[in-house]
Every structure is written in C-alpha cells, then in structure tokens.
Image: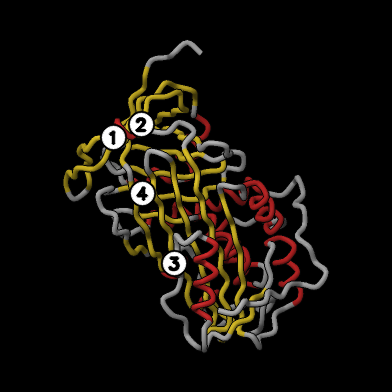
Amino acid sequence: MAAVPTLTAEGVERATPPDGAPVAEVAAGITRAGHALAERATTTNWVCSPLSLAFAFAMARAGAGGETAAEIDGVFGFPEHGTHEAFNSITRQTATEHVHLANGLFTQFDLPVGAPFLRTLATHYGTGVHPVDFARDGAEIVNAWVHEATAGRIPRLFDALSPATRLVIANAIHLKAEWRHPFEEAATTHEHFAAAGGPVRVPMMHLTADLAHAAGAGWQAVELPYKGADLAMRIVVPADDQAPDALLAPDLLADVARSLAPAYVRLAMPRFDYGSHIDLVPPMKALGLRTVFEAGADLTGIHPGLRVDGAVQRATITVDEWGTEAAAATGLMSLTSMRQPPTITVSADLPFAFVIVHPPTGVPLFAGIVGDPSDTAGGRSG
C-alpha cells in the first residue's frame, strides 16, 4: 500500500502544554464516561479505553459549535477553557516506552477542512489530515494505521466503510508493561472462579508482596504497579455479589485512590485475555450526546454539513504472570449530512473490576469487568 501523506497546518508545531492545564477536571470527566459505558455493557467480560474514547470526541469537539459542542462538553465533563491543552498534557505525561498514543483524521481527498481545526489538531494532538479515497481503499488505510498504532493488537477497526464516508476521526492506544512484582508462574494453579453462569475452573495466579491496599463498604482493592512506569492496575473486588460495573463508579474509584495504603498482601487473581467490540452510538445517545449524530449536527469547524454517522471502539487486554498488554482504537465516521505488617488476603475469585490508571493525573487508560476469565472469545458490547 502506498504511503498516505499527512497534511498539517503550515508552520504549526505541537505546543508544550501549560502547567495550569485542567487535567484533573478532564480526567474526572473521562472516568465518569467510562463508568457510564460500563453500566451499559452487555457481555460477561468487557474492556474499554475511556481515554481513547475521550480523545476521539475531544478532536471532534475542536470542530464543533452550538448545541453539538455543548452536548460533548456535558457528556465528557470538558471544561469551558483548556480542554485541548489538557489532552496535550495527558499525552505528554502518559506516553512512554510502555504506552503509545496516536491520533488521526482521515478525510476524503477532495474535502476541504477548516484551518483553525487543523491548527488545533497540530498544536494539541500532534496530527494532521490523511487524505484518502473512501470509495476505493479508505477502510483498508484506516485499519492499517490502527494495526500499526496498536502493535497488531487491533488488526482492524472497521469491517467496512460506506463509499459516502467523508472523514474518520481515530485514536489508538497500546500499552505493554511488566509488573513491578511479577507473579510466580509455578504458583499458578487451576481453581474455581464464581462466574455468573456458574463456577468455572481457571488458572489462578498468586502473589504475596508489599502492595497498596484499600477497603471500603462492600469492596476491597489492590494496586499492582508496573515496572519502570507511572502506571498501575487497580483490582477492585466486591465483598458480596454486587454488580462489578458498580465498582467502576467515579466516587468509589476516588475512594480507592484516597484510601490506598502500604500493606503486605496475599493476592489471588485469574489470568484473563479477551476483547470487546463496542458500538458507541446507543450509549452515547443515552448519555445525552444526540445532535452530533443527527443531520443538524454543528461540525462546521471541520466542514459544513457533516454529522457523525457511526462510532465504534475495539479493545483487547491480556493479563498474565508477567504483566499486561492492552490496546484500543476508537473511530468516529462522518457522512455528509518496614516491619512486616499482618498479611491481607485478597481473592479475585468472583466477578471483579479493574482500571489501569496513570496515578499522577488520575487518567483511566483502560477499564474493564472480568465476569468469566475462562471465556477468551471476547464479546460485543453496546
């Protein structure tokens, strides 16, 4: 496949984000959006990247106006000022050798794009426009970009694109990191997991180490840090049979973050490996994001007469004794129109939730529900 040129705002380089960018406010909004999607998950195992979702809509927000802009701000909790600076700062802080973030805008080759929108993409998102011919090979080009940006974890984002497609806004994220305290592979044994459909036997990993632990009404949590990175997975296990999506509620996750304290933990948790394919349109509409999908959408900052016709995310995660590899891609398609303390035991042997966070900013890169670790087929969620 021939290389696709990238057109950017002439003479515009990516800005250094200001120290006062509203990262905490944006991170809180991303967490709320991720929980709202989790509440609407329809599969036993579910994973998404709240951050990838927010990046895609933040780029769309750069070209939105009127009610469309107000709805995007309302659903994602974007502040009145500084949203794009915050996303630039999040990229600078989270993108390391362990995390790769990529943004892309693919447009029909003869579609003119607003200059201010191009400047925002170049300044804060580090990207420009990739002109393609959607009637010929647009889906192939977008999918190849996603495949490369996720190190092959997401081989394709779209099964097909309409020849009438005018643009695709895309974000991709890939994470690969080893545990700071790896599980001992020899200690992994097949044990029962209390899946919703009945007990299943799964490979259960075991670790005893100095970790951060927290407990609250009906839950306990453990933070597993990654080696050489400001990243951690927080496992939240219910004390009873409450729905695991409730464990991703923003207030509960904030309690987890505030309550984490050093402890000597004996942890048992399953390996898991699955993926999700999420049609974002129904949950986004349910959350109040409607006009962007309608004929009257105001995306005139990108090009007059556009609306978002479809929005999808594919995500995968693999967790084993050595660490985690996860990836996600989101696409919006637009058409015209010291002394050892007592040991705390945590057993993740019933449906639980997890979130992979960047603790300095509180940004959730990935969030998910493990309902049956024996099911590696993934699922479709909406």
Q: CA distance from mark 4 to mark 1?
A: 21 Å
Q: How far from the left and from the top, in percent, is residue 290?
A: 50, 72
Residue 233 on image: x %, y %: 46, 40
Q: Residues within 10 Å of mark 4 (few under 14, many from 20)?
A: many
How dense is the environment of label 2, judged by Cα within 10 Å: few (below 14), some, or many (20 and up)?
Answer: few
Tag 1 residue: 188
Q: Which mark is residue 184?
A: 2
How far is the residue under mark 1 from the one under mark 2? 7 Å
Residue displayed at 65% across by 55% down: 87
Secondary structure beneath disc 4? Answer: strand
Label 2 amino acid? Answer: Glu
- Asked where in the image residue 156 lies, by quadrant, the reply is bottom left
Tell me the kind of residue under disc 4.
Ile
Give neighbour class at mark 3: few <14, some 14-19, many 20+ (Cα, 10 Å).
some
Q: Give the residue drawn at x 75%, y 46%.
A: 20
Three-letter code, disc 3: Pro
Question: Which residue is the site of mark 3?
Answer: 155
Specify the label residue 369 is tagged with: 4
Q: Quadrant of residue 345?
A: top left
Residue type, label 1: Thr
Q: Crowding near pointer 1: few (<14 within 10 Å), some, many (20+)?
A: many
Point out the tag, 3 or 4, that comes first from the N-terminus: 3
Mark 3 or mark 2: name the one nearer the start of the chain.
3
| Residue 2 higher or lower than 312, as above or below | below
Mark positioned earlier in the residue sequence (1 or 3): 3
In primary-sequence order, the first of circles 4 and 2 is 2
